[in-house]
Amino acid sequence: MKRPALTLNTTAMLLLTIFLGLLGGHALANRQPWALTCYDCKACGAACALGIDPQGFVAAQLANDPDLPIYATNIRLNVRKALALDPELEITRGERHLPLRQAVTQFGLAPSEEVVTYRMKARHAAALCLECAACEKACVLELPLLRAIRQLKAPQPAGATHAK
Amino acid sequence: MTILGAMALALFLGACLASIRGWIPQRALTLQTTLLLVAALIVILRLAFGKPPAFGEILGGTSLHPITATVAGFLLAGALQAAGGFDAASALLRRLTGTGLGLPFALVVLVNLPTIFAMPCGRILAAPLMPLALLLGQEAAERSGDRTMLAMVVFGMLVNAGASCVPSALGGIGLLGEGMGRFPAGSFGDPSQLGTLVLTLATMALIRFVHGRDLKMRPPATTEPSVTVPDQGYTALAVFVLMLALVMIVRPRIPLQVILTVSTLMIMALARLSLANVLAGVILHPLSAMIAGFLVAGALSASGGFDALLWLLEGLARHTPLGFVGVSILVVFLPLMLAMPCGRIMSVALIPGVLLFGEKVAHATAFPLAAPVLLVSFILSAAGSCGPSPLGGVGNIGEGRLRIPDFWSSRPQALGIFLGVPAAALVIRFGGVSGGAYRLSTLSTCLGFGLVSGLGTNWLFGYRLRHLGGLAGGLLVGLLVWIL
Ligand code: SF4
Ligand code: SF4
């Protein structure tokens, strides 16, 4: 391998290693190191009555991104409340999933009309979570998911390391 | 479907094709670097389209479990290797050829050993099993006067090793699919192992009857492997088998990585190994390929690449004579056409798109198991494709040892995979998706496939179809597939 190619490829491998380290770093910085043990098997998702994918909360901790879009497929909100939460959250309408703002203009939804959510920011899903702990019981490793949920619930500036 | 999504998908598929065809030479840009550049280009495209870079989504889409399980699996494999555990397995098998069961028994067990002791990367077992494959292959060749038999044993074992990373409980690709598709843990294990038995047999048959006819090789002179197995080799092997049984049967609510690490430490203490011995077992290539795959998958997902893939597949299914079934076949064998040196690249990058398409197929054909059938077949085809890959696939190991032209084995391996993958699909089609439980119906399926494998081995190596060795070996393979 020629020198420039060698340098480029070595840099790429180092970047990949750093990328992996970043996930561990975020888990530690957010004081949720247990998040590293998640299998990403989604067994917890089947237990949630709100259709939330609780693994998304783990992913938000690892990515240090409370705005990470996660699935929440069965939360019913009226349009007014949903718009106040996030006009960009995705809802289900028939067979389609589309952003709320687009649905409102396209279908002329009234503020009192009910919509079913599909995907939303992790911190918004955390705010709507019932804290019933069904996901914790269903988790194959019995991980303390509520810890991640409560931390995301706390008000925080978007993109910042989560409030403790 | 957005233009950004279509461009992102085209970039990814184009980069894979360019690497396979050699338009991007590996000595200039390795696959990992190429994939990293693709991810960077997709982020730049996002910016050009006035969208934020979505670093959070790219990071959050990474699944750490298969990465950490693979590292822990490699460390355990390193400890086993250094303690002589693999040599012990070879020696045990060798001893069995001296019994009334003879060569067919040893052959059927040997070529299927990688999928029984499924490791997170097929290369882990391919190297230590190679001396025994050469020895038994030579014996079979001399007995029958047909030198092709040596190539049959070597490439049978290698294609089996290539596909064996699917069922591995130590961080196999199957785990990825089960997690991403929300299927029960362990549910892809048996179907992929049974499919692997068939693709191994098919590859050996293709070499015997089609591709091996005018094969010229200069194999190394084989002698009885002189390695004396240290006592701790057998103990290390026993610890490993017990650990596998514990993981499979008890399924404790402890992270797998912890169990693997404890087993590694036990073997290290038993065999007085140093950290360096164990670290030597880590193969970085599949790890970095997986991380790069996750990065690209995250970038594709955030930019609508999977929506574009779905749009394309659905369009082909609805508006061409291929229909949903034809396009499903195309999807399943796409990794074989773009054979990467590590199946994880295609798997990680495309599983979300395959799953979405599987749901569409289920809807269109009113066949509820379409998604798992499609996914298992896709993953097995992707994993197996590291055997025939022209970018340093597992098959190269055999070509080097037998001194035959590079990539000679690509075709029989690819065709063997093509014939074996439907078997995995059929197992799910008729057995459904269930993980963990030891069901009697699954036992009979496993024994049935084992028996076919044994009968086929007897026949391919010129023994009576009912030779006890092949039959007993096949049944043992079936039983071990069911248990492990
Ligand atoms: S605590 Fe309850 S509502 Fe909240 S994510 Fe878990 S299962 Fe769903
Ligand atoms: S069930 Fe537990 S281990 Fe599996 S994805 Fe959910 S949180 Fe992670």
Image: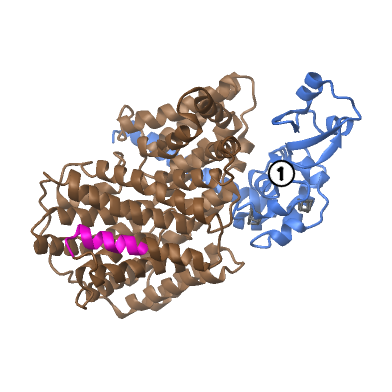
Image quadrant for the C terminus of chain B? bottom left
Which residue does the image show at 58% across and 63% down from the upper left?
A: B255
Which secondary structure dominates the residues rendered in magenta? helix
Determine the colour of chain B: brown
Q: Chain A: what color?
A: blue
Is B409 drawn above or below residue B105 in the view shown?
Answer: above
Give the mark count.
1
Image coords of residue B112 (percent x, y): 32, 61
Badge 1 amino acid = Thr
Q: Going 76% across and 32% down the picture, which residue do you hit? A: A89
Q: Closest to the observer: B30 or A82?
A: A82
| Residue at the outermost right position | A112
Q: Is residue B454 magenta?
A: yes
The quarter in which the N terminus of chain B is drawn is top right
Chain containing mark 1: A
Horizontal side, residue B34 vs residue B429: left or right: left
Q: Is residue B231 above or below residue B116?
A: below
Q: Name the element at disc 1.
A: loop
Q: Quadrant of residue B60?
A: top right
Q: Where is residue B311 in the image (x, y as percent from the top left)?
A: 56, 26
Stretch in magenta: B450-463
Q: Name, please, the residue furthest toward the bottom.
A: B231
Measured as percent of width and height from the top left, residue B445 is found at 44, 62
Residue at figure coordinates x 69%, y 41% from the top left: A70
Split into quadrants, the picture shows ligand 2 in the one at: bottom right
Residue at x 62% of width, y 37% of height: B57
